[in-house]
Image (cartoon, rainbow, N blue to C red):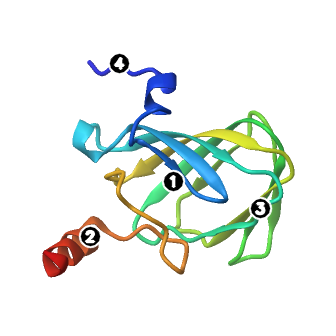
Amino acid sequence: MIVRKLQDIRKSDRNVKSQQWESARLLLKDDDMGFSFHITTMYAGEEIKMHYQNHLEAVLVLKGTGTIEDLGTGVTHQLAGGVMYALNAHDKHVVRPTTDILCACVFNPPVTGKEVHDESGAYPAEADMVREAALTN
């Protein structure tokens, strides 16, 4: 059984921050659950472009408002507490929070916690990370 407190994760290296968001990674690949689980805050006024080419993601908005635009179709959806979106086709998208958006996110395959978004808005596949580490060591 794994039991963790969000307040403890927020004080650890599992809490990752960028200019656009902050993500507390409660479960990661090394927890062997088959997915990773994050509590993420996307900051108001930002335009967050993402394209997870190597991961599927489901997001439940807990509180806050904004929009998500599917860049493949141009369709925009309203985000608010209780709305879930799933990027089931590696959808290229942009989130535009009008207020801070607090959400719960699940990634499959699980992230390791060391990923950073690349120029396309994706996390690299784990094999890419292993190859890059081998080249730098």
Residue 30 can be seen, yes or no: yes
Amino acid type, callout 3: Glu
- Give the mark, 1 or 4, whose residue is nearer the N terminus: 4
Residue 14, given in percent of the width and then of the height, sits at 40, 41
> Which secondary structure, mark 2?
helix
Task: Give the Cα distance between marks 2 and 3.
Answer: 28 Å
- Which of labels 3 and 4 is toward the front? 3
- Marks 1 and 3, the one that precedes in the sequence: 3
Q: CA distance from mark 1 to mark 3?
A: 20 Å
Residue 46 badge: 3
Q: Which residue is mark 4?
A: 3
N-term-proximal mark, 2 vs 3: 3
Residue drawn at (35%, 18%) of the image:
3
- Quarter of the image for residue 132 reads bottom left
Q: Which residue is mark 2?
A: 129
Q: Is residue 134 left or right of residue 132?
A: left
Secondary-structure class at tag 1: strand
Q: Residues within 10 Å of mark 1 (few under 14, many from 20)?
A: many
Q: Secondary structure beneath disc 3?
A: loop
Quarter the N terminus occupies = top left
Q: How far apart in space, not on screen, are marks 1 and 4 (Cα)?
A: 22 Å
Image point 48% across, 75% down: which residue?
A: 118
Looking at numbered disc 2 in the image, what kind of residue is underneath it? Answer: Met
Q: Residue at x 44, y 65 (%)?
A: 116
Numbered disc in front, either 1 or 3: 3
- Which residue matches tag 1? 57
Q: Are marks 3 and 4 in contact (CB under 8 Å)?
A: no
Left or right position of 48 against 8: right
Q: Are marks 1 and 3 in contact (CB under 8 Å)?
A: no
Closer to the N terminus: mark 3 or mark 4?
4
- Labels 2 and 4: the sequence-earlier one: 4
